[in-house]
Amino acid sequence: MLTSTVCAAVSAAGLGIALLTAYRKRFLAATRIAAWSLVPIGLVLTGIVDWVRDVVLKPSVWAGFGVLALSALLFMISRAVERRRGGTREDRRAAAAGRAGAVAPTASAPSLGSGRAGDRTATGGTKAPARDAEDFSDIEAILKKHGI
């Protein structure tokens, strides 16, 4: 009830300002002001103001937002732990089978975050890529070009 009264007052004030602007022969600006001043009363008449008020003032809605935030936090934590461990469960099983001397089953594709799953050797270590020398020579050339 109070929100609809406030919105009606804001609309009335805006229409008054629009009339004063039109009196000064600034019709384009007056039309824009009138359009903006009709928005609050339109929101009241459609019921959007009451819906927003109910969303903001209900504790159960805020509890729902809290639960959603907790869920997102748990997803982020599980993803960070998965990245820290070095891949998915299938990647770890394949690495364990490789360390035990057995033939590891081929994984279809490494997980997006691991990036190191293809570089593991049968002994559990990592092999150095052959392109390291090229990469450093490119970096050295760039640094020399900039005088560093």
Image (cartoon, rainbow, N blue to C red):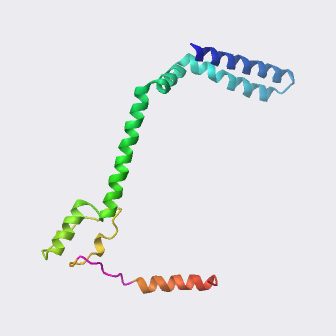
Q: Nearer the viewer, residue 8 or 36?
A: 8
Give coordinates of residue 133: x percent, y percent.
43, 86
- What quarter of the picture does the N terminus occupy? top right
- The residue at 63%/23% (across/down) is 39
Query: In the image as oriented, which residue stretches furthest toward the left?
Result: 102
Residue 8 lies in the magenta-colored region: no
Front residue of this view, candidates 102 and 28: 102
Residue located at (87% from left, 24% from top): 24
Horizontal arrangement in the rendering, residue 143 relative to residue 9 (left or right): left
Question: Residue 11's x, y, as percent?
Answer: 68, 19
State the count of labels.
0
Q: Is residue 47 left or right of residue 103?
A: right
Q: Residue 94, relative to residue 29: is it above or below?
A: below
Asked which quadrant contains residue 110, the reply is: bottom left
Q: Is residue 10 above or below residue 68?
A: above
Which x, y percent locates residue 31? 75, 25
**Along the horizontal axis of the image, is 100 left or right of 43?**
left
**Rendering quarter of residue 98:** bottom left
Residue at 62 percent across and 14 percent down: it is: 5
| The C terminus - image quarter | bottom right
What's drawn in magenta, residue-wise?
Answer: 124-130
- Residue drawn at x 54%, y 19% is 46
